[in-house]
Image (spheres, rainbow, N blue to C red):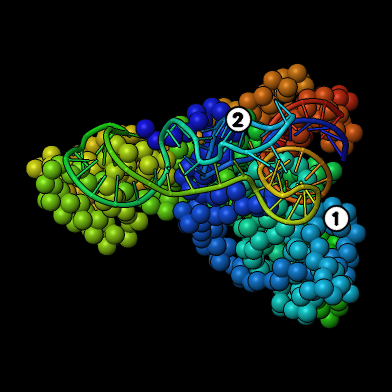
Amino acid sequence: MAKALPKKADFSEWYSEILSMAGIVDVRYPIKGLSVWHPFGLTLRNRVYSILRSLLDVDHQEALFPLLIPETEFMKEAEHIKGFEEEVYWVTKGGDTPLEVPLALRPTSETAIYPMFKLWIRSHTDLPLRVYQIVNTFRYETKHTRPLVRVREITSFKEAHTAHATWEDAEKQVHEAVRIYSDFYDRLAIPHIFTKRPDWDKFPGADYSIAVDTLMPDGKTLQIGTIHHLGTNFAKTFDVQYEDVNGEQQYVHQTCYGISERCVAAVIAIHGDDRGLILPPEVAPTQVVIVPILFGKGKGVYEAAKRVHKTLSNKGFRVVLDDSDERPGAKYYKWERKGVPLRIEVGPRDLKSNSVTLVRRDTFEKTSIPMSELVPTINQKLKDIHTNLYEKVKKSFDERIVECTTLNEVKTAVKKGIAKINWCGAEKCGLRMEEITGADVLGELTQTKKGKCPICEKQTDKVVLMARAY
RNA sequence: GGGGUUGUAGGGUAGUCUGGUCCAUCCUAUGGCGUUCGGGACGCUGUGACCUGAGUUCAAAUCUCAGCAACCCCA
């Protein structure tokens, strides 16, 4: 028997073990908070990000800005600095020569991008401007680091930056970003919920911030994306202006929104089970694995397996024929751990009936499929797996969002998930609610409901989510 | 932010106090050969480590200092 994976009920252990056992990342790189993507993990990552790219490429352009930001630019926006100061890595020397202007390793790229926006934007015809990049960023995290979730090098930060003529246009872009992120997480079968962050927790330099969260198996929420309306705050700092139709100079209104490799963490954590990963077919590096069952002189079996492999790969499926020396059982476990959605067994019995045996990773349903129906069946099953995965986790997600009217109810609810409660909107009350429950205020929902703030007892229709957050 | 513990092969451990015996050991790690193959095979035979750097010493896994890393506790 190979090394066993901890049960998923011990989520923390399960998570760190599966990352290494399935070959996602290797955390043994000798710098705290940085890890190495294994080829398998990187392929998964790339598949996930290619969905994100395809959603953005509709009306965004991909660009690439430098990693280093001069201190002089970085320090321009006062609030922004306050928010990031403690987390910035600095490059201070070139060889032995101290640099006249220290260079920041970008923790995020506003201060790298907006000085260029100033050069690029002249007139209203240049707007809206929408660019994005997928890059690594560095943050000197002092809290406990956790692979893909809290890291010092975010290796896959997708950040989009847009500029618009009016505050309202920028707000429309915020809504559009919400739609894009919602579509993105649907494609990953990740249940998610958007809230407007409370003011004390918004992005430094933003008018307001919207976050998207999901729920991990241990009942803690994971923020898997943020969207910020920047107003003219950065435009004023970096003097980004355009000439409007009347020939007058106006500041642009900006937004930015980002997603990190936490989206990959969510796919791993939310779909996996006691046997390992379960990957949505669209992002699975391998969608189908073929295991030949070779008895003694199983030459015919091997040939048949090769034919199945060829048929499927010609149709564009990502398929692997596992002809290694292990016994079939060992192979089943191995590929299940890697989350391959479908397994095809080809053995003497199948050969005799001119069919193959098909096994689903999500349900372990085992069916015999005539060779002639192979391709349409696989197509259908892959779709079914996505639907089934999403339905299952969505149900569990919805069940763990609990309507509360008292803070005691909140305390109970956040042990397993998310609490929904009224709140007057005052910072003082919000912070008090966090203090009493030990949970965080995630943010405000757009939907409203009449009720009372649990602290000051004022009538309100604002509803917030509270949870223990990663 | 403060305090503590730890670092020995892919993983788990012994040895560290009291420097020399250390070619240590176990495994679900790993190479080769053979028999096997419809849910984690078996036999034979191999491989592989003392976190990094400096210091003390005839001699360092062991003692000292620093660094790096991991884990735990408290705020």
Q: Is residue A298 visible?
A: yes
Q: Amino acid at mark 2?
A: Asp
Mark sitting on residue A85:
1
Instruction: State the residue lying farthest toward the left.
Output: A352
Q: Is residue A376 visible?
A: no
Q: Residue at 15% x, 54% y: name it.
A: A303
Q: Amino acid at mark 1?
A: Glu
Count residues near mark 2 (Cα–Cα under 10 Å), then give few for <14, some for 14-19, many for 20+: some
Query: Is residue A407 shown left or right of residue A414?
Result: right
x then y, percent, for residue A238: 85, 70
x then y, percent, for residue B41: 29, 33
Instruction: State the residue lying farthest toward the top.
Output: A408
Say yes or no: labels 2 and 1 on the same chain. Answer: yes
Q: Which residue is mark 2?
A: A218
Name the residue nearer the viewer: A278 or B15. B15
Q: Chain of mark 1?
A: A
Q: Residue at 46% x, 45% y: name it.
A: A22
Which quadrant: the C terminus of chain A? top right
x then y, percent, for residue A212: 66, 45
